[in-house]
Amino acid sequence: MLNVANRETAPNGRVMDMKILVVDDEQVIRDALGRRLRREGYNVFLAGSGIEGLRLFHSEQPDLVVLDIVMPEMDGLTVCQRVREVAETPIMMLSANAITEEDIIRGLNAGADEYLVKPLRLNEFVARVQALLRRAQMTGNENASGYNDGYLSVDLRRRHVYVAGTKIHLTPTEFKLLAVLMENSGRVVTQRELLEQVWGHEYVDDIYYPRVYISQLRRKIEPDAANPVYILTEHRVGYRFEKQPNV
């Protein structure tokens, strides 16, 4: 197990500001991911179990967490839920099985932002890490203050979302998705546009992502997710955000 004080550094010896926590019970995998992320200049922490991962999360407060799903003592979904109770840190889940929409929905319900299937291709892994960090740092159009109709209130600058007066949690990906739709309110945003603007060009072939994430976002913000009034579907084209009269 990694000593908490054992902080990995960039090849030039400088400790990097951007921290990534990798939690995986397979030492070969976590060491390989750690080496590659370190070469990219990240400050990396490694944990071999969910419990150790949570300890490192609380002590080091990483900018991104990479979580294996199947681990002893505490699985990745449980770790993800524990992290989400206290932070909005981007979370990438790793799965040894092919990803289905049901897998993504379970991960989203736990609070995950991203899924990748093992065995990992390291170049793709790094690209997706970078894309996820970019999404987490984006706050939307600085000139757009947000939206408020009395039921749904969104502050784009502060990243706050309220539904019927109650503040709700959105993952970085969900917030970016909502922000892109709101900034294009009244206009259909195609699935390809969403993939490029929300997830990045690395995701243009992942056509199921918008559908799954839109469904989850509707569950959080719509009065009735089965009959949405804010996020409407244009069949085989994309989605649009529809403003509502003040209540």
Image: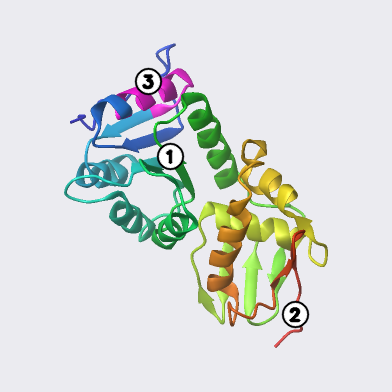
Q: Secondary structure at mark 3?
A: helix
Q: Give left or right: position of 7 versus 169.
A: left
Q: Quadrant of residue 11?
A: top left
Q: Residues within 10 Å of mark 3 (few under 14, many from 20)?
A: some
Q: Residue at x 32, y 39 (%)?
A: 60
Q: Is residue 110 magenta?
A: no
Kindly tell me whether residue 159 is visible in this rendering.
no
In the image, residue 192 lies at what x, y percent?
A: 73, 48
Q: Nearer the viewer, mark 1 or mark 2?
A: 1
Q: Can you say which quadrant of the picture contains the N terminus? A: top left
Marks 3/1 in contact by CB < 8 Å: the verdict is: no
**Viewer-side residue, 5 vs 56:** 56
Q: Which mark is residue 244?
A: 2
Work out whether mark 2 precedes mark 3 in sequence or the reverse, and give the earlier one.
Answer: 3
Up/down of 188 relative to 206, above or below: below
What residue is disc 3 on?
Answer: 35
What residue is disc 1 on?
Answer: 117
In the image, residue 17 lies at what x, y percent?
A: 45, 30
In the image, which residues are magenta? 30-43
Kindly tell me whether residue 165 is visible in this rendering.
yes
Q: Give left or right: position of 21 versus 244.
A: left
For the residues labelled 1 and 2, the Cα–Cα distance comes to 40 Å
Q: Secondary structure at mark 1?
A: strand
Work out whether mark 1 precedes mark 2 in sequence or the reverse, and give the earlier one.
Answer: 1
- Counting every numbered tag in the picture gives 3
Q: Residue at x 74, y 48 (%)?
A: 193
